Amino acid sequence: MKKIDLSKQEKADIIRAIQVYFSEELDQQIGALPAELLMEFFTKQIGPHHYNRGLRDAHTALLGKMDEFADALYRLEEQRDFRR
């Protein structure tokens, strides 16, 4: 899997979301550094699973569209009766 590169703003937003989650859901305060380390852990450990699932979902969607395209091409074919 290609390394996930996040912009500074994306990292800041994720870190802030982690801090808000800890505060609102767990009644715990977490600093920016621990939140960043947690984000990096999840990115490395869980990110590949989500990435691969996204690829499989995209592949399934693409195959469905290819089937639709093949059906559309078939409908465009002229039907000839050579028995006459």
Image (tube, rainbow, N blue to C red):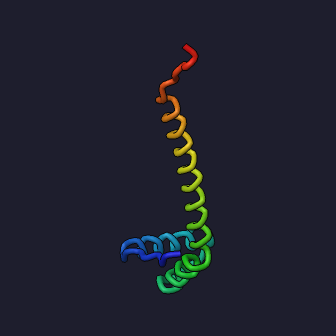
Residue 23 or residue 79, whichever sits in front: 79
Q: Position of residue 47 (x, y in %)?
A: 57, 72
Tell me residue 3's x, y (percent). Answer: 48, 78
Give the percent coordinates (x, y) of residue 19: 51, 74
Q: Relative to 78, is 8 on the left or the right?
A: left
The relative height of residue 23 versus residue 60 in the rendered view (above or below) is below
Residue 38: name its quadrant: bottom right
Q: Quadrant of the C terminus?
A: top right
- 34 to the left or right of 6: right
Where 72 falls versus 82 (above or below)? below
Which one is nearer the viewer's eye here, 53 or 23? 53
Which residue is located at x 42 percent, y 76 percent?
5
At which x and y percent is residue 44? 57, 79
Single out the residue that lies furthest toward the top: 84
Residue sitting at x 54%, y 56%:
58
Q: Examine the rendered structure and indicate whether residue 12 appears above or below residue 75.
A: below
**59, above or below 72, in the image:** below
Foreground of the two, 23 or 84? 84
